[in-house]
Amino acid sequence: MCIFVVNLLTGKEPWKSNCLSIIHYPLSIIPLMAAELFGLKVMGRVMGIILTADGLAEALSPMLVGFLHDRSNDYATGFASLIGMAVIGALAIAMLPRKAAVCMEVK
């Protein structure tokens, strides 16, 4: 990410630098959240489910948008469906159980 920003600020072509790490940057937080929510004992199983769902979504979303474009001759319906799915995902994440905060007294 830093290489991308430096190349952008210096006028070089930033898209040729470190694009893969920029595209997959959110993947680095997913294992941390999964470990915190579900524990390390089931980490492999949880990550298998998450990454399979992610791969299917990445493969099928462009086809869904294309299908909706063919039906309506407008990209607005396809992108509105993606926004709707993103909202549903955000709500699902918001409803995940949270651990109680642990307060420590300083003596």
Image (cartoon, rainbow, N blue to C red):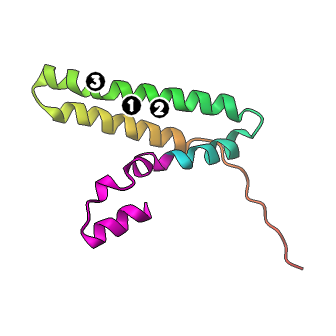
Q: Which mark is residue 68?
A: none
Cα distance in 3D space between marks 1 and 2 = 6 Å
Query: What residue does disc 3 label?
Result: 64
- Give the magenta part as a residue range: 1-26
Could you tell me if the residues under marks 3 and 2 are in contact, i.e. CB atoms within 8 Å?
no
- Asked whether 84 or 50 is in front, the reply is 50
- Occupied quadrant, residue 46: top right
Percent across and percent down for residue 3 are: 40, 63
Which element carries disc 2, helix, strand or loop?
A: helix
In the rendered image, the quadrant that contains the N terminus is: bottom left
Cα distance in 3D space between marks 1 and 3 = 11 Å
Which element carries disc 1, helix, strand or loop?
A: helix
Q: Which mark is residue 58?
A: 1
The residue that appears at 36% across and 56% down in the rendered structure is 17
In the rendered image, the quadrant that contains the C terminus is: bottom right
- Occupied quadrant, residue 66: top left
- Asked whether 70 or 95 is in front, the reply is 70
Instruction: State left or right for residue 103 relative to residue 84.
Output: right
Q: Tell which circle, 3 or 2, labels the residue nearer the N-terminal end.
A: 2
- Amino acid bearing label 3: Leu
